[in-house]
């Protein structure tokens, strides 16, 4: 029985039972497996479709390197579209590609032997030329210790190879493994020195980020730049000033690059594939070389005659288009022969920048007080503000009084003009009229603070104290001395501002102001580039005239001012057109430090203005003597090329816009 019971018990224990907890665990296992499998599938899809291109690029860049080649910089032409003021000239350069690590002594000896051979070749074809690199210099350029760049980057040994050197290395290519002759480009400029401060200059990119924010941003983004054509090479020439800087992106083009596989030592492994650089766009400027050269020579000629003046500036701007046909800042320099120590006081554009005196004080500041050329605008302001009428007379006794102490501010030479109207006040250049009728008038109407503010608003409407909008970098906006109290009362500041002694402006600002006088209130944006062309010469962009703002003055006010702009100027004797003009002599400093600056503005013809000109000669004395002869020669040159009446007096129309 015991055995039967034991068997029965054993039989009952062997019988399976329904275990629900085990079923739940199984379901959880399958669910977890499904989740994990789904995550793996999702991750695989993400890697393939999202991260795939980036991983592919990283893998490729890990084994293949793209070495940038400087792009071919586009040309800069004068207004004719034919005369190149800046251009890229192809040259052949010798490079060496290091296929081995030459840092140990045995390998370094092989590199020394190569350097000796190359030096001997250079000496053979250039006997007596001390500028040729010797073996020691070549070893430095090979950079065997990778101090300057990576091992796979070709080393520049010599630029601008001669024809004989090129032929030799091409013929002996098998004897010089790793030696390559590659075409590069050198920036050249018109040897006549045409508007060099306008055109600007180029320097190596490696120097640029330290001084120019534009290039600092480019360097900082280099690590994430995926387009090889946009990668800047350290030795690449980039614009540093003028149009070269302003239109850097258009002129640059695209980098070429050499693609080469590298090994684990970061050295070349295989042949190099070359993608050539692309040529940049070309600029057609508004500068006419013939007129520009006349302007430059005219300033130079006048400076020789003047005892103190050593600089001069002129801008000639078309009234309807805003085209700047001439912008001269003299002395200038030769951009093909860059020596900073020689040109540090003349390389900047004094017509658009504030050019301070040099260390010895021999070079005057380029931005000066305007003097009497402000008087046409002073009269316009007085008429607009209702301070007097066009027919109203003023008794000019030769001076005006200021302050409680009765300080007298006199006319030039204490000239007594008697009873005069506004137009006669401009013609006779009456300081007394401007002080009593305009300066004091604004003070009496608005008080000191608001009076100065109203004056400032009118100045800026005419482009004095604001950007002209010119397509050049580093434009100076002016020195607004009337906004700085300097222990002077508001009345004194308004009084002196009214006859041109409280604001310093650039020659370009003065030219834009003159253009507004000519066209009766339209502030035209001056520009120096009228077309941008691709490498095939097709126009990709045309710059059209642009009105920045307009002032609404009664036509009678404009006529009054124009009729007053008739000052006698002997340098214009025999000029075949009626023209409007104003001379100026601004004073800076007192006593032995007193400086008289010559200023002159004019537009012609009077009734149908085509061209406006502003000339500034720091320390030139009277504007009628120092500045007006320069303007006359520019007007004559424009008449020859384009015609002040629309009919060129020369043989043909040169680069004239017909807009």
Image (tube, helix red, strand yellow):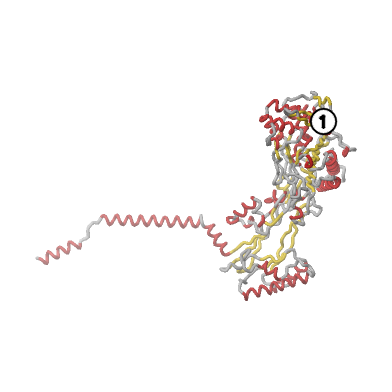
* 269 to 471, vertically: above or below: below
Under circle 1, the secondary element is helix
Tell me which residue sits at (63%, 56%) in the image.
Answer: 231
Q: Mark 1 points at which residue?
A: 564
Q: Which of 460 and 13 is in front in this view?
A: 460
Q: Quadrant of residue 428?
A: top right
User: Quarter of the image containing the N terminus?
Assistant: bottom left
Pick out the residue farthest to the front.
405
What x and y, as percent, mark residue 194? 79, 50
Q: Which of 54 and 184 is in front in this view?
A: 184
What x and y, as percent, mark residue 128? 79, 69
Pick out the residue farthest to the right.
574
Q: In which quarter of the image is residue 261?
A: bottom right
What x and y, as percent, mark residue 333? 78, 52
Tell me which residue sits at (77%, 24%) in the image.
Answer: 389
What x and y, as percent, mark residue 524? 73, 38
Q: Which of 82 and 327 is in front in this view?
A: 327
* 433 to 596, vertically: above or below: above
Apparent side of residue 308 relative to residue 261 in the rendered image (left or right): right
Q: In which quarter of the image is residue 521?
A: top right
Q: Can residue 553 be seen in this view?
A: no
Pick out the residue farthest to the bottom.
106
């Amino acid at each position: 029985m015991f055995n039967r019971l034991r068997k029965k018990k054993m039989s009952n224990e062997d019988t399976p039972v329904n275990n629900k907890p085990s079923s739940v665990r199984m379901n959880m296992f399958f669910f977890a497996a499904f989740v994990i499998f789904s995550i793996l599938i999702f991750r695989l899809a993400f890697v393939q479709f999202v991260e795939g291109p980036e991983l592919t690029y990283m893998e490729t860049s890990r084994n293949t390197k793209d070495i940038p080649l400087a792009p071919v910089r586009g040309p800069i032409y004068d207004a004719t579209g034919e005369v190149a003021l800046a251009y890229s000239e192809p040259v052949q350069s010798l490079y060496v590609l290091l296929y081995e690590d030459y840092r140990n002594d045995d390998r370094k000896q092989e590199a020394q032997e190569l350097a000796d051979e190359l030096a001997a070749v250079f000496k053979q074809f250039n006997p007596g030329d001390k500028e040729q690199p010797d073996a020691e210099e070549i070893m430095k350029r090979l950079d065997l210790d990778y101090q300057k760049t990576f091992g796979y980057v070709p080393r520049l040994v010599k630029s601008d190879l001669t024809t004989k050197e090129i032929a030799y290395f091409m013929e002996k290519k098998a004897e010089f493994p790793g030696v390559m002759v590659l075409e590069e480009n050198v920036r050249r400029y018109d040897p006549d020195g045409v508007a060099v401060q306008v055109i600007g200059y180029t320097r190596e990119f490696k120097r640029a980020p330290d001084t120019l924010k534009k290039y600092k941003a480019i360097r900082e983004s280099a690590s994430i730049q995926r387009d090889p054509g946009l990668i800047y090479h350290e030795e690449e020439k980039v614009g540093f000033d003028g149009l070269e800087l302003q239109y850097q992106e258009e002129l640059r083009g695209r980098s070429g690059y050499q693609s080469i596989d590298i090994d684990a030592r970061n050295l070349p492994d295989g042949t190099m594939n070359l993608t050539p650089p692309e040529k940049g766009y070309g600029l057609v400027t508004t500068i006419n070389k013939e007129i520009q050269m006349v302007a430059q020579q005219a300033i130079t000629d006048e400076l020789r005659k003047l005892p103190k003046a050593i600089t001069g500036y002129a801008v000639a701007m078309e009234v309807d288009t805003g085209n700047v046909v001439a912008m001269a800042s003299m002395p200038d320099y030769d951009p093909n022969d860059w020596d900073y120590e020689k040109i540090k006081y003349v390389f900047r554009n004094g017509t658009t920048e504030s050019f301070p005196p040099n260390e010895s004080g021999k070079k005057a500041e380029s931005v000066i007080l305007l003097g009497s050329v402000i008087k046409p605008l002073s009269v316009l302001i007085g008429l607009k503000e209702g301070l007097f009428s066009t027919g109203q007379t003023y008794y000019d006794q030769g001076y005006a009084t200021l302050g409680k102490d009765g300080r007298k501010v006199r006319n030039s030479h204490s000239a007594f003009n008697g009873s005069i109207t506004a137009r006669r006040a401009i013609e006779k250049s009456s300081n007394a009229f401007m002080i009593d009728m305009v300066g004091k008038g604004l003070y009496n109407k608005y008080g000191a603070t608001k009076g100065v503010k109203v004056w400032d608003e009118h100045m800026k409407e005419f482009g004095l104290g604001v950007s002209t909008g010119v397509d050049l970098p580093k434009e100076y906006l002016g020195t607004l001395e009337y906004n700085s109290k300097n222990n002077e009362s508001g009345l004194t500041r308004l009084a002196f501002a009214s006859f041109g002694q409280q604001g310093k402006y650039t020659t370009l600002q003065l030219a834009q102001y003159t253009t507004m006088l000519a066209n009766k209130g339209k502030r035209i944006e001056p520009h120096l580039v009228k077309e941008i062309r691709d490498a095939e010469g097709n126009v990709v962009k045309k710059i059209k005239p642009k009105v920045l703002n307009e002032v609404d003055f009664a036509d009678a006010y404009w006529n009054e001012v124009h009729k007053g702009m008739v000052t006698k100027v002997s340098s214009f004797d025999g000029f075949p057109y009626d023209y409007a003009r104003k001379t100026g002599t601004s004073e800076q400093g007192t006593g032995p430090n007193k400086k008289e600056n010559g200023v002159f503005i004019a537009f012609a013809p009077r009734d149908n203005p085509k061209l406006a000109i502003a000339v500034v000669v720091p320390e030139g004395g009277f504007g009628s003597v120092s500045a007006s002869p320069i303007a006359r020669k520019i007007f004559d040159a424009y008449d020859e090329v384009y015609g002040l009446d629309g009919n060129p007096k020369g043989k043909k129309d040169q680069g004239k816009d017909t807009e």
